[in-house]
Image (cartoon, rainbow, N blue to C red):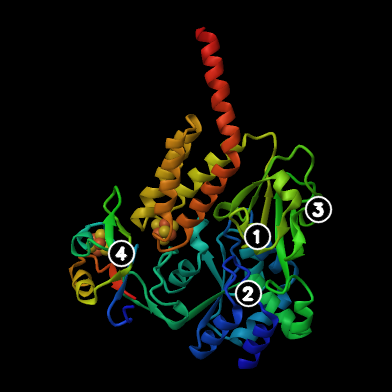
Amino acid sequence: MASSLDVAKIAVDRVRCTGHGICAQTLPDSITLDEWGYPIVTDDQADPDEAKLAVKLCPARALYLR
Amino acid sequence: MTELAQLLEDAGLTGRGGAAFPTAIKIRAAIEKRARLIVNVCDGELGAAKDGWIVEHHLDELLDGVRLVAGISPHTRFAAHRGSATAARLAAAGLPVLETPDRYVSSEETSLISLAHGGQARPMTKRTPFVYGGRDPQGRRVKPTVVLNAETLWRISQINQHGAQWFRSFGTQAEPGPRLVAIGGYVARPGVYESAAGTPLAEVIALAGGMTQDVRHLGIGGLGGIVMTAAEARYAIWDTPGMKIYGGSIGPGIITIWNPAEDPVDTVNRMLNYGAAESAGQCGPCMFGLPALAEDWRRYVDLPSGTSARRLTDRVALLNGRGACAHPMGVARFATSALRVLEPELTGRAVGRRYLEGATRG
Ligand code: SF4
Ligand code: SF4
């Protein structure tokens, strides 16, 4: 089993999120998009480095780690 | 003060605003952080009336509860809908009123915190509980703030006066204490009544005059709640396990008996449209998802089939947990139970329609 250090828990601040959909490209195993381009978190556990990058790339500063 | 938290833990008091979170945990954090207190007196859910009832009938005890939790603080606020009788009563008593717009989500906990900090009465994302303080969407600092429902504070005063044992002599082991319920709609004596978990639902409704034989449906918990049939209600138990069978909870203490002269399908239409209109328009999945849900419901009603039902349930799944507040989830819950309860009737109508069409053609 992965320890808590091996995974990051991702979450979306829905008020800030503008549906750019970039997160779905950076974290394709965790995030898909709905018909309007808003993220659906299919698996909130992600590789910490990839998750951190995705957080950095989110233009609305909506993606965050818990 | 920590004694108070211990007393509330012994009593097993949970928040009476709907979420049923243990009050002792909230109070401990509030004391530790010297959080400011907002008393929620909004009766924000559809059919809610108990907060205003407390102000009308038990204001002294409510204020005693406020004093126990926050002392005499210049920062305490009483949140009530602008222009309501409750707001007027609070103002007449010389209390600082936080006037909230008459919108469905404006009485949500984080909406009140935002409003008290000079922002709009719209929900904020809870990255961490606001009792620890935080940031609003614009990045401004939010002071540690705790929101307690009026009934919760009234119960705190009662527990402090009569003790945890007294409190536990009502209700069930898991859900102790007296709890207010607002019973409205098609009953002889709509109003606010004392109830307790574990009572047969029919007995609770009897307080307001009971269900007449012609009643077919009733709502539990308003727009964020469920629909059930009168037949189910005759045997149901008024507690969380009892309501969970039908997808609901005793939550904010609301029972609405639907008028049998009105088509229940129209009632559901109206509520889903209202739910869509009351999205605060901040979160994409809610702002686009709720109107789409109302539309999918209409399509289902027009042509009930496995396909249109699946569309609806897929839509519901996409609303869960995808907003800053619980509004989309509540409406999704309501739609799910409406589908469950009205499916046989709608399918029957569709068969009847097809038969008639066939007859006119033939
Ligand atoms: S990248 Fe950020 S703003 Fe864009 S969809 Fe993802 S979370 Fe939302
Ligand atoms: S989930 Fe809907 S109602 Fe709640 S804050 Fe977001 S847009 Fe507003």
Q: Are marks 3 and 1 on the same chain?
A: yes
Q: Is residue B291 left or right of residue B255?
A: left
Say if B49 sits above or below B115 in the image. above
Helix, strand or loop for disc 1: helix
Q: Disc 2 marks which residue?
A: B14
Residue drawn at x 62%, y 56% as measured from the top left = B221
What residue does disc 3 label?
A: B206
Q: Toward the viewer: B94 or B133? A: B133
Task: Name the residue located 61 percent from the left edge and 88 percent from the top edge.
Answer: B71
3 or 1: tag closer to the N-terminus:
1
Could you tell me if residue B142 is visible in this image?
no
Mark number displayed over residue A16: 4
The kind of secondary structure element at disc 4 is: loop
How crowded is the residue under tag 1: few (<14 C-alpha within 10 Å), some, or many (20+)? some
Q: Which residue is mark 1?
A: B85
Residue A31 lies in quadrant = bottom left
Q: Are marks 3 and 4 in contact (CB under 8 Å)?
A: no
Q: Chain of mark 4?
A: A
Disc 3, disc 2: CB below 8 Å?
no
Q: Tell which subunit mark 1 falls on.
A: B
Mark 4 → mark 1, Cα distance in angstroms:
36 Å
Horizontal side of residue B283 vs B164, given as left or right = left
Left-right relation of B225 to B255? left
Of mark 3 and mark 2, the one earlier in the sequence is 2
- Marks 3 and 4 sit apart, C-alpha to C-alpha, by 47 Å
Chain of the residue on which disc 2 is drawn: B
List x then y, in percent, for residue A20.
Answer: 22, 57
Q: Chain of mark 3?
A: B
